[in-house]
């Protein structure tokens, strides 16, 4: 019988209830995800546990009378209705009743790859997200069973990656990763993917947010994606030698549904890049090569189509896919620009850079990039250096998704709190001229990243206004990596940011150029 | 032997030598019924305690029978309270139409073999830091890590092992019995791990759990009480045997996979059991003057 008399403590006893611990923890986690519930515990009512519940103020009369073979579901909640929902959920789970909205096809008690394959005989891919120490073994098991592998885990030793990719290559399988955050395979998004239109552009990326940015811009250009294959950030390092990029290139070249291929990578090893370019030259499908910091001349000489920014890669590939004229590099040297003066729907904001800089405080000079995507941060650094020269190193572009920031904390794409801390610090620092942000939408990302940032921006603005000590709010420039089909909604996210006074750019590259322009005009004058 | 014609018969791959009738040669002491049914195991309960029919990949269990070629034992159809017939040749659950043929099963001894203390102690002292690092990397948090009530009992358990104080060890054990999450509460799993370590070292406090058995059925779950009874007489699951062989064996490379396998059991049971093993090994061998448990829970 449910005990709902207490305002904060709610409990129900299930007599002689035996469930394995994994199931009990899963149910507890599910209950805790209900809004209004602070804490849920499912424990056997042994005398020791009853004492712990009593000490925590969670021991109801019913639980106090329970025996060691009885299961107590104890919930600490702000309101009785939420607690009731939690108790009902527990009862349904313990009775083996499927919850409303649950998908039986995704419910499984499998605890090993072998069990999962037995359960789902048609499986052809394993998504592995375990600590790095164990990921290699699990990936190998999956490969041996003939499954492609999406290896989300990081901290996988390089030698393991080399061996796993060798096994995958021999077996004709894809080993996507390690630290692979994004893929779209046969229209199925994996990891942090965006909702994009299906089409004829095939992407292979050793860059998670790079793949996201290119796929979103392709969608916005009216084209679509056939396959988006992530290969892990180290695939083009020496040793790994582009193993999976080469295999993925071969697959896409043979795919009748792919009319143009885009290869995306953070700065690659030169010898590995040459090997990939040679392979790209041998395929009939047009290949756009977007290697950040890559050698444009070498790409061109190898027959590839160079793109030095994600926006350029998307513009070129989208044009090829749609049968439109391919954009040529502008006189400014920025390929993919809409024109020689870099104008575009939002690039017009660059013309206002001087005005934005004039509104800054006297000591403001620095660009503070606070990124959730490593590749987007990398692209911004390159573009700022190109715009500002050697002085660019004095600016700060942080990849807050890097391991040093995420030990023991969720990734900033999921949890905005870490970035908000940095955002506040940057906003109130009088040397900050412009804060540069990426806002990444899509599956797996925070449900309202723009809202979380905007709230922090509004709070910082209000704090500076109250201080009235001469400090001015820095300019804030952002691009939203997303589409109208994403769960968060591109238009709504951009509107929220605009409301908070954020200058929006159509792409990360455009945002970086705008930030560099503002810094170049900043009164602190050290750009 | 009753004809199995009306039942689906599974062949047992292994039977524990402490299984009544087939293992011990002595008939079961009284009626047996199905207690609980899980994917990997069917628990049976009777006057002889907990008996288990398990999938072969679970590994040997005290009072256990292992069968191959079954992925999900729930599919066999047994339900709690069904009557179980046990004799030298078979286990039968007539209401479920299931029989397990024991006649050709290999026999397995759940008794943990003690090792010479001096060499084991030296080897553990050398390996303790490495094992601590492996355990620290495990993805699962021990079940009692957030139960402040456990701290003094864990510290007292370690201290009593260090000083060879049996009454104090029993006192600490009584505080841990039934404490924490899980069908086998975390405190019980820690105690089982500690008991295994002390048996493995042939330590003076081997068997300290006897003192907590008196009213064990009132203090913890039936399944856990049965496992503690096994532990008190030195009988442990095969994965604990393997863990011990790895921790104190010659090949240090075997440690990490053995730890991973032990830790993977249940939601926290494996990690909790490991915690108990390490706590007792550290305390018994005087590693660092403080046990791993002291460090972890005294922080």
Image: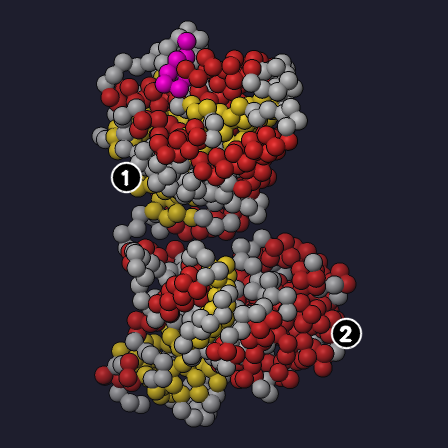
The structure residue drawn at horizontal position 23% and vertical position 83%, both measured from the top left corner, is B6
Q: Magenta stretch?
A: A341-347
Local crowd at mark 2 within 10 Å, few (<14), some, or many (≥20)?
some
The structure residue drawn at horizontal position 67% and vertical position 67%, both measured from the top left corner, is B151
Q: Are marks 1 and 2 in contact (CB under 8 Å)?
A: no
The numbered disc on residue B163 is 2
**Res A4 quadrant in image:** bottom left
| Nearest to the observer: residue A238 or residue A299 | A299
Residue B161 lies within the magenta run:
no
Residue B210 visible within the image: yes
Figure label count: 2
| Nearest to the observer: residue A461 or residue B229 | A461
Residue B64 visible within the image: no
Subunit ID for the residue under disc 1:
A
Q: CA distance from mark 1 to mark 2?
A: 64 Å
**In the rendering, at what x and y percent does residue A434 appear?**
55, 23
**In the rendering, at what x and y percent does residue A523 appear?**
61, 15
Q: Relative to A511, say whether B127 is above or below.
A: below
Q: Identify the element where label 1 is drawn.
A: loop
**In the rendering, at what x and y percent does residue A156 appear?**
51, 43
Which secondary structure class fits the magenta region best?
Answer: loop
Is B226 placed left or right of A114 in the picture? Answer: right
Is B168 placed left or right of A503 in the picture? Answer: right
**In the rendering, at what x and y percent does residue B269 appear?**
52, 67
| Nearest to the observer: residue A66 or residue B31 | A66
Label 1 and label 2 in one chain: no
Subunit ID for the residue under disc 2:
B
Q: Relative to B118, say whether B138 is above or below.
A: above
The numbered disc on residue A401 is none
Q: Relative to B281, say whether A249 is above or below.
A: above
Q: Identify the element where label 2 is drawn.
A: helix
Residue identifier under label 1: A186
């Amino acid at each position: 019988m449910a005990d709902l008399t207490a305002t904060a403590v709610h409990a129900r006893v299930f007599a002689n209830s035996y469930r394995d611990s994994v199931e009990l923890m899963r149910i507890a986690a599910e209950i805790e995800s209900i809004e209004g519930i602070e804490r849920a515990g499912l424990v056997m009512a042994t005398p020791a546990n009853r004492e712990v519940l009593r000490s925590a103020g969670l021991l109801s009369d019913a639980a106090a009378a329970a025996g060691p073979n009885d299961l107590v579901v104890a919930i600490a909640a702000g309101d009785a209705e939420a607690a009731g929902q939690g108790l009902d959920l527990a009862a349904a789970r313990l009775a083996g009743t499927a919850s409303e909205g649950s998908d039986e096809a995704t419910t499984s008690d499998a605890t090993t790859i072998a069990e999962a394959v037995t359960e789902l005989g048609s499986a052809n891919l394993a998504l592995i997200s375990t600590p790095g120490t164990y990921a290699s073994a699990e990936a190998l098991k999956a490969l041996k069973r003939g499954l492609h592998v999406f290896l989300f885990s990081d901290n996988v030793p390089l030698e393991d990656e080399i061996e796993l990719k060798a096994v995958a290559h021999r077996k004709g399988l894809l080993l996507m990763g390690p630290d692979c955050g994004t893929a779209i395979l046969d229209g199925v998004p994996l990891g942090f993917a965006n909702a994009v239109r299906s089409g004829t552009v095939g992407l292979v990326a050793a860059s998670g947010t790079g793949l996201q940015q290119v796929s979103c811009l392709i969608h916005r250009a009216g084209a679509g994606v056939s396959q988006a294959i992530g290969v892990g950030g180290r695939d083009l390092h020496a040793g790994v030698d582009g193993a999976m990029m080469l295999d993925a290139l071969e697959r896409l070249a043979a795919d009748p549904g792919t009319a143009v291929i885009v290869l995306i990578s953070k700065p690659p090893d030169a010898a590995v890049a040459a090997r990939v370019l040679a392979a790209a030259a041998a395929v009939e499908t047009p290949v756009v090569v977007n290697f950040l910091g890559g050698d444009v001349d070498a790409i061109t000489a190898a027959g590839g189509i160079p793109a030095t920014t994600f926006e350029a890669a998307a513009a070129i590939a989208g044009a090829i896919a749609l049968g439109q004229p391919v954009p040529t590099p502008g006189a400014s040297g920025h390929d993919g620009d809409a024109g020689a003066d870099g104008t575009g729907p939002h690039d017009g904001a660059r013309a206002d850079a001087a005005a934005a800089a004039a509104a800054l405080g006297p000591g403001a000079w620095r660009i503070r990039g606070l990124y959730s995507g490593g590749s987007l941060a990398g692209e911004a650094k390159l573009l700022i250096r190109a715009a500002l020269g050697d002085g660019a190193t004095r600016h700060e572009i942080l990849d807050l998704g890097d391991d040093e920031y995420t030990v023991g904390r969720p990734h900033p794409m999921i949890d905005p709190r870490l970035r908000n801390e940095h955002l506040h610090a940057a906003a109130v620092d009088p040397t900050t001229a412009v804060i540069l942000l990426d806002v990444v939408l899509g599956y797996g990302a925070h449900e309202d990243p723009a809202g979380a940032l905007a709230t922090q921006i509004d709070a910082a603005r209000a704090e500076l206004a109250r201080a009235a000590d001469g400090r001015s709010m820095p300019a804030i420039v952002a691009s939203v990596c997303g589409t109208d089909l994403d769960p968060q909604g591109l238009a709504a996210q951009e509107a929220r940011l605009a409301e908070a006074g954020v200058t929006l750019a159509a792409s990360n590259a455009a945002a970086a150029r705008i930030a560099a322009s503002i810094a170049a005009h900043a009164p602190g004058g050290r750009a | 032997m009753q004809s199995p014609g009306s039942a689906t018969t599974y062949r047992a791959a292994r039977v524990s030598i402490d299984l009544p009738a087939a293992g011990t040669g002595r008939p079961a002491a009284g009626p047996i019924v199905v207690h609980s049914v899980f994917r990997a195991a069917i628990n049976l309960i009777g006057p002889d305690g907990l008996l288990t029919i398990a999938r072969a990949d679970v590994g040997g269990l005290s009072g256990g029978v292992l069968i191959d070629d079954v992925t999900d034992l729930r599919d066999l159809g047994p339900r709690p309270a069904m009557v179980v017939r046990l004799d030298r040749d078979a286990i039968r659950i007539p209401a479920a139409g299931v029989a397990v043929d024991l006649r050709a099963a290999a026999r397995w001894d759940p008794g943990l073999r003690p090792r010479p203390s001096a060499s084991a102690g030296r080897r553990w002292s050398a390996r303790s830091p490495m094992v601590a690092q492996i355990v620290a990397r495990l993805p699962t948090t021990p079940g009692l890590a957030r139960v402040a009530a456990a701290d003094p009992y864990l510290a007292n358990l370690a201290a009593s092992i260090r000083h060879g104080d049996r009454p104090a060890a029993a006192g600490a054990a009584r505080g841990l019995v039934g404490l924490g999450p899980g069908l086998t509460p975390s405190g019980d799993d820690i105690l089982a791990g500690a008991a295994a370590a002390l048996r493995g070292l042939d330590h003076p406090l081997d068997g300290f759990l006897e003192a907590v058995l008196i009213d064990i059925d009132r203090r913890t779950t039936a399944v856990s009480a049965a496992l503690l009874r096994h532990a008190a007489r030195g009988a442990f699951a095969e994965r604990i045997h393997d863990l011990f062989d790895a921790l104190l064996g010659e090949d240090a490379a075997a440690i990490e996979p053995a730890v991973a396998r032990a830790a993977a059991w249940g939601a926290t049971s494996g990690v909790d059991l490991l915690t108990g093993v390490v706590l007792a090994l550290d305390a018994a061998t005087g590693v660092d003057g403080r046990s791993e448990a002291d460090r972890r829970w005294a922080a």
